[in-house]
Image (cartoon, helix red, strand yellow):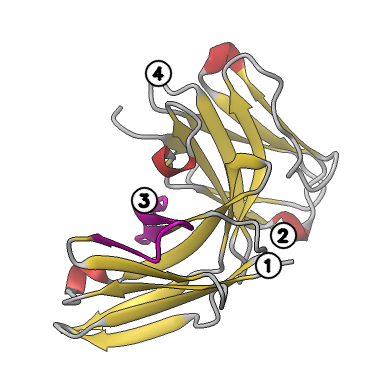
Amino acid sequence: DQQVKQNSPSLSVQEGRISILNCDYTNSMFDYFLWYKKYPAEGPTFLISISSIKDKNEDGRFTVFLNKSAKHLSLHIVPSQPGDSAVYFCAAPLPFGNEKLTFGTGTRLTIIP
Amino acid sequence: GAGVSQSPSNKVTEKGKDVELRCDPISGHTALYWYRQSLGQGLEFLIYFQGNSAPDKSGLPSDRFSAERTGGSVSTLTIQRTQQEDSAVYLCASSFSGKWDEQFFGPGTRLTVL
């Protein structure tokens, strides 16, 4: 049972434009969310996170927005660059066991030069 | 090495055989995690080691799966009597403190069970 869902398996965006990756969750007890980025043949790397006490967290070109009422978060990348082409995973620590992460199925982002 | 390493990078085995997957965490990291990603699925937590504490095995899908961590460093994930549904990429991660935002992942082992 997927508690974290990424409904778009792939996304293509023109270089320089904004990339928006979406993530929905079902467990209202989640209080922290993370985005990981994964290149082929490599493990995921941590990108950015957000606590449920915030609705926005920004780090350079990357911004994550959280809408708790809708149980939805999104990752914005502006401007998109070719090196951003990767698979992006949304994740959340499981309640009462917050060392363990539950991940979405990922969205493959392709930046078109 | 600077990062988490895993071996082998690819493993093809026949149904019913046992396999061992190895993970070398970053030196000094006390926490070690195993995850797997099956086709079309997200990363699924399997097992978590933290220091000398008893491991959290709550994610292991069956008793055919086991893992150990020797000397608080290298870990081996063993799958006995492999089944085709065990085919997946098995990822290992380590962290210094057990905090989830500091997990560093290895490149994974792609297991194919024929």
Dot 3 amino acid type: Thr
Q: Are marks 3 and 2 on the same chain?
A: no
How many badges with numbers are in the image? 4
Distance from the alpha carbon under mark 1 to that under mark 4: 33 Å
- Which residue is more in the foreground, B80 or B102? B102
Q: Position of residue A61 (x, y in %)?
A: 19, 67
Q: Residues within 10 Å of mark 3 (few under 14, many from 20)?
A: some
Q: Earlier in the sequence, mark 3 or mark 1?
A: 1
Q: Residues within 10 Å of mark 4 (few under 14, many from 20)?
A: few
Helix, strand or loop at disc 3? strand
Q: Earlier in the sequence, mark 4 or mark 2?
A: 4
Q: Which residue is mark 3?
A: A45
The chain letter for the residue carrying disc 4 is B
Q: Quadrant of the N terminus of chain B?
A: top left
The chain letter for the residue carrying disc 2 is B
Helix, strand or loop at disc 2? loop
Dot 1 amino acid type: Gln
Does residue B74 show up magenta in the picture?
A: no
- Which residue is more in the foreground, A25 or B33? A25
Q: Which residue is mark 1?
A: A2
Residue that extends furthest to the right in the rendered view of this protein: B63
